[in-house]
Each structure stands twice: as structure tokens, then as C-alpha cells.
């Protein structure tokens, strides 16, 4: 071990973190259901979204049924409802009336009106990796209310300072955090 490595501690798990908490929505037997996903990943410059889903999740039924889902980004004021979506299964409680649901172009991917950002996805591929499934969604359309945008140098941009996403950290802490200030480049 070289000198620099001597004061490096090993922390178990994947430290590619923090990430915004997302609420993935799917219609299960024609009713909206949402669960919390902590490990999500956009790729190919955001054209696709990847996350893993354990087979016993009720939401998995709806994703297979319709081959569509939504990604909703809750803000801090939705933390209690977000906790319900991450702790309780649609098998045991009806999560369809937790939020004001709406549909977009795909018609079968329920989205949450209270969440400032909503993304509709079509299932592109489902990977079987043993412990669960890897869901790859192709982004079809993204929605944001005008109140969460700002104009800069003639462009309309999404203002993350107004969104107040719930940030989920790994590395043993596994708590929720707030997003900080913008570093102006
Ligand atoms: C912070 C956090 C991150 C989570 N990440 C995942 C995940 O990546 N994949 C997964 O299958 N479940 C994940 N869960 C668990 C589900 O959200 C939870 O089991 C939920 O109640 C399932 O709901 P459903 O059965 O209605 O689909 C996470 C939960 C929390 C609180």
C-alpha cells in the first residue's frame, strides 16, 4: 500500500451518492401505485433511466402490465408521503389517493401533480440479474411547472433551487439531505 492509501478507510457499499429520491409510479390493475427508489441512474445523456426493482414490489406488477412508468421528483414538503411510499407496499395499503394523479402522453404512467418534476417513460428493457430486475426506461416526456423555471441568457432553465429535492445519501448514513447552493461556473 502506498503512503496516500494509508489514511483511506474502506466504507462498504456503493458511494456514488448522493442522489435525488424518486417516486416511481405505475398503474397496477388500473390504479396508480408509487414506490421510493434510491438508486436511480440517468444514462446516454439522459435519454434513458435505470433503476433496480425487487420482484416482490407491488409496483413491478404494473410496470410489467403496461410497460410504462413515471419518475416523480418530490420536494421536501412531501417527505412524509414519500416515507409512506418507501415503507408501505401497495399490497397492504392503497397508495392511489396519497396524491393528485395525472396522466400524459403514454396514458398509463400515473404522475404526481404535487411533485415539481415528472418524467414519463416507456420500458426499453428489463434485465434479470438474479436478486431482482433492472428496469431501463426510455424517457418520453418530462414535465415541470413554469414556477420552477428561470430565464438566463435567453434560455428557459429548470431552477433546482425552487424544486427542493429530497437528496438520499449512501455510505452508511442513509439519510435524507437538502440540496445546497448553485456553484456558478
Ligand atoms: C430510500 C429508499 C430507497 C429505496 N430504493 C429501492 C430500490 O432501489 N429498489 C427497490 O425495489 N426498492 C427500493 N426501496 C423500497 C421500496 O420503496 C419499498 O419496499 C416500497 O414500500 C415498495 O412499494 P410497493 O410494494 O407498493 O411497490 C427503497 C426504499 C427507500 C426508503
Image (cartoon, helix red, strand yellow):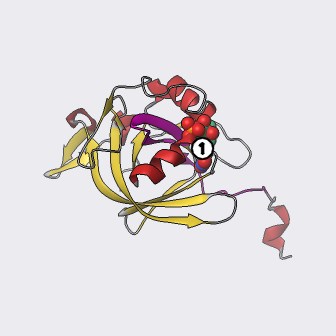
* Point 33% across, 44% down: residue: 108
Q: Is residue 1 above or below residue 147?
A: below
Residue at 23 percent across and 32 percent down: it is 147
- Residue 23 is covered by the magenta coloring: yes
Which sits in the foreground, 56 or 167?
56
The residue lying at 39 percent from left, 37 percent from top is: 30
- Ligand 1 lies under 8 Å from the Cβ of mark 1: yes
- Residue at horizontal 46%, vertical 35%? 33
The magenta segment is 11-36
Residue 35 lies in the magenta-colored region: yes
Residue closest to the eye, 68 or 172: 68
On the image, which quarter does residue 174 sit in? Answer: top right
In the image: residue 35, left or right of residue 164: right
Q: Splitting the image into 4 quarters, where does residue 27 fall?
A: top left
User: Is 80 drawn above or below residue 46 in the view shown?
Assistant: above
Residue that extends furthest to the front in the rendered view of this protein: 29
Amino acid at each position: 500500500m502506498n503512503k496516500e492509501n494509508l489514511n483511506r478507510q474502506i466504507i462498504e457499499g456503493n458511494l456514488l451518492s448522493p442522489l435525488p429520491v424518486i417516486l416511481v409510479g405505475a398503474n397496477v390493475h388500473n390504479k396508480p401505485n408509487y414506490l421510493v427508489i434510491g438508486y436511480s441512474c440517468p444514462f446516454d445523456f439522459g435519454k434513458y433511466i435505470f433503476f433496480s426493482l425487487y420482484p416482490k414490489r407491488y409496483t413491478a406488477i404494473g410496470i410489467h402490465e403496461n410497460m410504462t412508468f413515471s419518475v416523480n421528483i418530490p420536494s421536501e414538503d412531501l417527505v412524509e408521503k414519500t416515507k409512506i411510499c418507501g415503507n408501505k407496499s401497495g399490497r397492504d395499503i392503497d397508495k392511489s389517493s396519497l396524491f393528485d394523479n395525472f396522466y400524459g402522453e403514454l396514458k398509463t404512467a400515473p404522475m404526481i401533480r404535487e411533485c415539481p418534476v415528472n418524467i414519463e417513460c416507456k420500458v426499453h428493457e428489463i434485465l434479470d440479474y438474479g436478486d431482482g430486475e433492472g428496469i431501463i426506461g426510455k424517457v418520453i416526456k418530462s414535465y415541470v411547472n413554469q414556477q420552477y423555471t428561470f430565464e438566463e441568457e435567453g434560455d428557459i432553465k429548470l431552477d433546482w433551487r425552487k424544486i427542493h429535492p429530497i437528496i438520499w445519501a449512501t455510505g452508511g448514513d442513509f439519510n435524507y439531505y437538502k440540496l445546497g447552493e448553485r456553484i456558478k461556473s
